[in-house]
Image (tube, coloured by chain):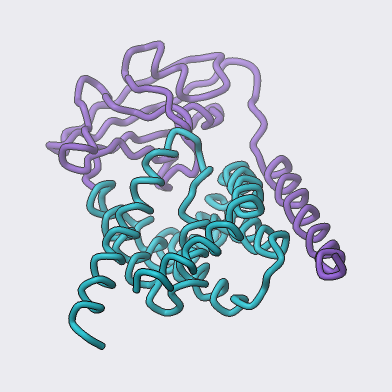
Amino acid sequence: MKKQTKLIPALIALFVVAALMGGLHLASRPSPAAGQKSIEVIVVHSDKSERTFHYETDAQFLGPVLMEDGLVKGEDGPYGLYIKEVDGEVADFAENGAYWALYEGEEYATTGIDTTVIEDGDRYSLVYTLG
Amino acid sequence: MDKRRVATQVALFGVLGGLTFAAKVAMMAMPNIEPVSLLVMVYAVTLGKKCLFPLYIYVILELLLFGIGIWSIGYLYVWAILAWTTWLLRDMRSPLGWALVAGAFGLLFGALFTPVCLITGGPAFALSWWLSGIPFDLIHGGANFVLILVLFVPLRRLMTRLLAERL
């Protein structure tokens, strides 16, 4: 029992670290902006051909815009929407390790497509990638 | 060491590596709630340095089945860090103590991958990647804490007894 009591400060420290991390995440999260936004989505296919799509939208997140348009098809997974098909091309990870990588500008996106916050003038790329 | 004992150990490491992977796949529908931390910790306290064999069999299976990407580099060292930490604390008997270790590992899981992000995308990308993954780290830490609090001590006892009887 004495040993367990000694661990109480460590337990409190763990909760404090978790709370700080949660706070940091909330503070750093971009807040969705209301109103009309104009965005551009470039699709890079497996044969390296590119197609560019323009959208005018009131939506706050990228996923619903592209799903509604039919550009992107996917399924909900434990980590959010998993993109299976873009512009008619399927990336089958089970078959050859292929997946659709999302880029915001030139940077690899750090959020899933359905949690990516849209801002006016944003440029995204969906790139067929072999793992 | 006689050949039979070596063969038994090789088979055991293969089975444990496969078991770890199967357990992970079985729980994949739940994001970041995984049995791998628990099993790696049990292997570390019962097998010592030899825990690296089942651990890396698991990692190889993971890479073979889920593909090799930039994130794979992280898998090459994160589990070894947990195993090494556990081995250093192997004399600890408190379930709460082990739960704290596993909880901290879960909380730090995303941060442990940031060196890879730092090299591949730079500091801004690494920071952004870690921050966006914090909700998953919180789930990971909480799930690890509960799983290890409940299961680590009985599994360690069972594994120690089985190893003493069979090897």
Q: Is residue B43 left or right of residue B11?
A: right
Q: Colour of chain A?
A: purple
Residue at horizontal 62%, vertical 76%? B89
Residue at horizontal 34%, vertical 52%? B19
- Above or below residue A59? Residue B150 is below
Residue at horizontal 45%, vertical 78%? B48
- Name the residue nearer the viewer: A70 or B108: B108
Residue at horizontal 66%, vertical 53%? B149
Rendered cyan, the chain in question is: B
- Name the residue nearer the viewer: B92 or B121: B92
Can residue B87 be seen here? yes
- Name the residue nearer the viewer: B162 or B49: B162
In which quadrant will I find the N terminus of chain A?
A: bottom right
Q: Is residue B70 left or right of residue A119?
A: left
Can residue B118 be seen here? no
- Residue B68 at x, y percent in the picture: 27, 54
- Residue B114 at x, y percent in the picture: 51, 61
